[in-house]
Amino acid sequence: MNYNSANRLSDKQLVERVLRGDHHAFGLIVKDTQKLVGQIVGRMISHAEDRKDIIQDVYLKTFKHLSGFRHAAKLSTWIGNIAYNTCINFLKRRRLRVVGDEGFPEAAAHDYDGGTEALIEGRELAGIIAARIEELPPLYKMLLVLFHQEGLSYSDIGQITSLPEGTIKSYLFRARKQLKESVLMQYKKDEL
């Protein structure tokens, strides 16, 4: 059988082959979803060793429960949901904050004149934004990455997170607001 590309096989075909004992087909599933899983886990879990363990756990759960996949969503979305839930459970067990506090810093946003941004080169700004994203609560980081970097729709994100579309939009708004205020505060510090 030709396994050159997971794209040639449908989700249903891949799942059927894995369930018949074809471990190479499962390797194709892992290869096809590793970026998404890595993005979810990487944004929600801060320690590298924990990330490795969680990613391994995600694929063990995927393999174990693959017979329960009902093809109601894309396979990658279903696996993304497993990754998300595994991260949430890990964070809850460790009693870590999943979503940010509602008291966002407000000070920097009010007197921004727009001149500061003109002083920063594109690469430097991207570095500052990336650093500030890493400081956001895990759920906010993950939502920003899935929406802006992975280009997933609200519907796909909803299938991964089991959150209603309105909640996703609200969290994305809060995440962007918190990110903006954090970046602006950094600009203010740098100007002093």
Image (tube, rainbow, N blue to C red):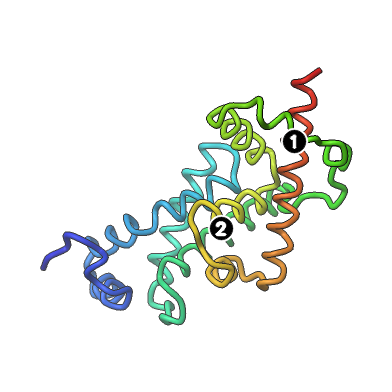
Q: Secondary structure at mark 1?
A: loop
Horizontal and vertical percent position of residue 134: 63, 39
> Residue at 87% of width from left, 42% of height from top?
106
Residue under pointer 2: 147
Give the image quarter of residue 108.
top right
> Residue at 75% of width from left, 49% of height from top?
177
Q: Is residue 71 above or below residue 81?
A: below
- Mark 1 residue type: Gly
> Residue at 77% of width from left, 50% of height from top?
100
Q: Nearer the viewer, mark 1 or mark 2?
A: 1
Number of numbered discs present? 2
Q: Earlier in the sequence, mark 1 or mark 2?
A: 1
> Residue at 29% of width from left, 63% of height from top?
26
Residue under pointer 1: 114
Horizontal and vertical percent position of residue 117: 68, 32
**Which residue is most to the top?**
192
Q: Is residue 128 left or right of residue 123?
A: right
Circle 1 crowding by C-alpha within 10 Å: few under 14, some 14–19, many from 20: few
Horizontal and vertical percent position of residue 14: 27, 71
Q: Secondary structure at mark 2?
A: helix
Q: Does the residue at mark 1 contact the one at mark 2 (Cβ under 8 Å)?
A: no
- Mark 2 residue type: Phe
